[in-house]
Amino acid sequence: MSPYRSHLNSSDDLVTTYEATRAGFVALALEKNRKATPYVAEARALQAAASSAKTPADLLKIEGIESGLLTAAGLSDKALNHLFPEDKQEAIQGLIKNFLEPAGANFVEELVFRFLLTRGDTLGGSMRNIGGALAQRKLTRAIISTLTIAGIGYQWQHAKSRKWLDMTDDDADIELSLRGLSWQNGTGNRTLIYNLTVPLVKNNVDLSLFNLLPAEVESSEYKIPETYIALGELKGGIDPAGADEHWKTARTALDRIREAFSKAGVTPRTFFVGAAIEKKMSTEIWEQLESGILSNAANLTHEKQVVSISQWLCSL
């Protein structure tokens, strides 16, 4: 039986329900609030420190708030890397003269508002791909749970340090900072890497599964086409308005993957996991599954489907 038949009976099973869409938007809102918490704490700290100033000009005498003043002046962390000390002083002086002094006795309140305005812009930028991050976390947790229930040990790679760490009894929240997973099954070593630029494809691929040890992947053996077992696209955006565009992007990426590997005489499995799947999309995905173009697919908002495709990945 084809692997997708374990959780799909027809194209209708792939369609995202209204309830799932609503829950997805709520999850995004909660994550946005979580990510905003440090910025709110920074604003409170700035307010407390700035409150000792009698006039806007006195803010220049307070140690430790220059970064906050620059943020309130509208400068992002990225912009600050390109400025000289005199440029920063000019920006702060402009903030004081043009916005804080006109605010009169409410200059501290004005300062905090402007600080939060810039931080809000930073938050908005970081939220653009939050759907993808949430999708990766959800799929990762499902894979880890599948391995744990099966009694299979694993290693995981920290996204920032790139170090491979052994599993522990307390694996809570490791999906927040995980880039890769590695395990052994009855067939051999398996390593899954997220967001890897595949040399043969010359593009980023959301998920790449290898028949290699982590050290072998790190030693650039991922350049060998025969080491790839499966490659997949993961689209976590929940907005139905963008669903079709997400699928078109994923479909193009998967076509590019198949074409590149076919030229090398290799045919790894390809799969798609998406959160927002509309009726028209589901029909096209189902046709690709039935014809063998796609090896597997699942709707990220459907728990049974996520578990099933995770089991499939772990068994390859």
Image: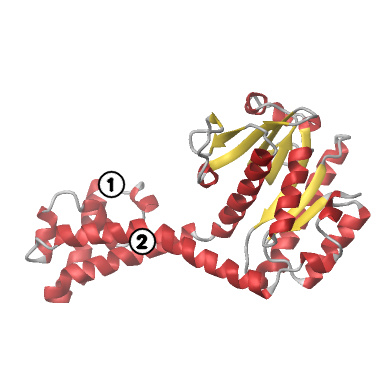
Question: In screen coordinates, is 6 left or right of 89?
Answer: right
Residue 171 in view: yes
Q: Nearer the viewer, residue 134 or 261?
A: 134
Query: x and y percent of residue 163 in the render?
Result: 52, 30
- Residue 159 in the figure: left or right of residue 123: right
Q: Which amino acid is tagged 2?
A: Arg
Q: Please state, as top left, top right, bottom left or bottom right, where the C terminus lies in the image.
A: top right
Q: Which residue is mark 1?
A: 84
x and y percentages locating residue 31 in the rendered image: 48, 61
Regarding residue 124, the answer to whether it shows in the image is no
Q: How is the image coloured?
A: secondary structure
Distance CA(mark 1)–CA(mark 2):
21 Å
Read off the residue under disc 2.
119
Amino acid on which disc 1 is placed:
Phe
Whichever of callouts 1 and 2 sits on the residue coming sooner in the sequence is 1
User: Tag 2's secondary structure?
Assistant: helix
**Residue 112: where, in percent of width, then height?**
24, 66
Instruction: State if disc 2 and disc 1 touch (CB < 8 Å).
Output: no
The residue at the point 66 percent across, 69 percent down is 242
Residue 205: image quadrant is top right
Element type at mark 1? loop
Q: Residues within 10 Å of mark 2 (few under 14, many from 20)?
A: many
How far from the left and from the top, in percent, is residue 29?
A: 49, 67
Q: Residue at x 8, y 66 (%)?
A: 55
How many numbered discs, if any?
2
Tell me which residue sits at (63%, 37%) in the image.
181
Seen in the picture, residue 118 relative to 315 is either above or below; the reply is below
